[in-house]
Amino acid sequence: MINGTKINIEDLNLYIGKKHILKDINVKIPEKKLTVILGPSGCGKTTLLKSLNRLTDLYPEVKTQGKIFNGTDDILHPNTEITELRKKMGLLAQSPYPLPMSIYDNITYGLRISGRRKKRYLNKRVEYYLRQVSLWEEVKDRLKDPASALSIGQQQRLCLARGLSVDPEIILADEPTSALDPVSSREIEELFLKLKQRYTIVMVTHILRQARRVADYVIFMYLGEIIEHGTAEQIFEHPQNPITKSYIKGTYS
Amino acid sequence: MKSLLVPSFKIRRNLRDKSSSFWMKCCYYLVLSMPFILLTGLLIKSSLLFGEKTFSELIFSSEWKPLSGKFGFLPFILSSLWITFISIAIAAPVCLLTAIYLTQYAKRFVLKVMHPVIDILAGIPSVIYGVWGIIIIVPFVSKVASWFNIHSSGYSILAGSVVLSVMVIPFVLNILIEVYRSIPIELSEASLSLGATKWETIKKVLTRKAFPGIISSFGLGISRAFGETIAVLMVVGNVVQIPKGIFQAGYPLPALIANNYGEMLSIPMYDSALMLAALILFIVVTFFNLGSRYLIMHYEKKV
């Protein structure tokens, strides 16, 4: 059922100051599937997600040990070319943070810093990625408007298109619907179901119903540890661990 | 049930309640009306001068001969402009780079150490900056001028600008640090995860986001620099002339007022002329304040 492995996390430990945030994480994230990292707030889900593309580097008090492999590249190795690594992973944050520029420039930003300058090429890419997130029809007449003028739901789809623009292999999504209304949330979920045919998606969520709707593979975390991981069916229908069981049943408090 | 309150006490209590807010309102209106009172006073006092000459004649004339009733403000206005803009040109990049370093690169404790340093810089009385200027900057400027084969006493536009730039730095820097700190870290994360380097992120995303704040900090710096009096007066030379280079002496508007008010008032119209200088100062400072505010509003709508 689960064949290829995309990301392989081995013995990952992460400390913030003296606090042990992630404890002995060992897990394989399957390729071209939607993997959900599930668990209550504050259990280290987001931290785990951010260590995948080393955004944890932004916080000087964070110390990491262990290995994370994307194919054969060790992500955590200090010699890893960090900009190339991050380009392989599109990021979708909790609430949309459009770059302070136009809709058009939000999409072309990643391309321009990669050295793509030709107008025709950029125009084509903008249309392509905006269509990917079903935003093209809504914004095609106002591409030069500031991105902040869009609604929150549109902004989140724009941010997704922006993430796709650098042609990543993996999409990292950190509770991507938590700031959105139900309709926009559903749009994002449907996009993910469409995109997982071509991308490996890792999504953090604490919403059980959302996880049930979209997940192929589930990693259940609690207090910085992986309690259980497996296919959606295994976790939702036959959870082994009592903590997982109570969380899945909704009796977790 | 009978009320517990003693009737006379109740009245007094209500009265006190009303009167307390009355005094608060009075204080508020006093503060609010202050700029208008000042402006009106300056307008009335300086209006005497307009009987004989138009505003533009006064502003664009460079003849300053109070004894024969000639009041041309151009030398003072130009001196003020020179000093203000050179000082901002020195302070602006220093502040911008410092703010970026402190908020994006430095360890957290460095910023913690820096805050009291900035407060100290801001709190030093301006006369001390003036003394420092006379002892260090003026001789240094004189020496620099000699490298260019220019004879200068050192009391010059440049000396005034350097002293002023140091005085403006804490104010501009304080705002800039706040501006950069208030940018959410998620914006950096978004840019970095698209493969941008740290510098690209700072240059193309963060500084763009910070732009209105940067403008407003410079605007505030300009309005502070334009009005600064004592420290500049001590090093700028105070010669009435249109400055032709940065090594020449100048005579900015605040120095004109500070040096002469109360001394030369037997000369007819002199106090009116000084009031006009004050009025110009007032208007320019207000203009830069409002101008930077307008720019912020305009830009925030756009992005």
Image (cartoon, coloured by chain):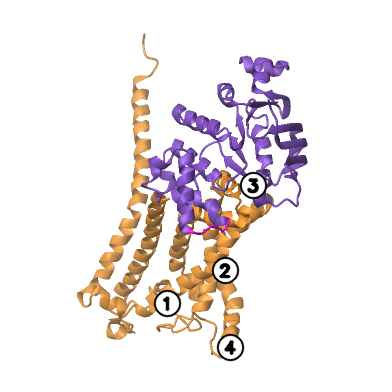
In the image, residue B255 lies in the stretch drawn in magenta: no
Give the colour chain A carries in the figure: purple
Q: Which mark is residue B79?
A: 1
What's the distance in space between the residues labelled 3 and 4, CA to CA?
55 Å
Instruction: Report the residue marked by disc 2.
Output: B128
Q: Please provide the residue range marked out in magenta.
A: A114-118
The answer to whether tags 2 and 3 share a subunit is no
- Residue A206: image x %, image y %? 60, 26
The answer to whether tags 2 and 1 share a subunit is yes
Q: Which mark is residue B169?
A: none
**Residue found 51% across the figure and 40% down from its top:** A96
> Does B173 sit above or below residue A222?
below
- Contact between labelled residues 4 and 3, with CB atoms less than 8 Å apart: no
The answer to whether tags 4 and 1 share a subunit is yes
Main secondary structure type of the part rendered in magenta: loop
What's the distance in space between the residues labelled 1 and 3, CA to CA?
53 Å
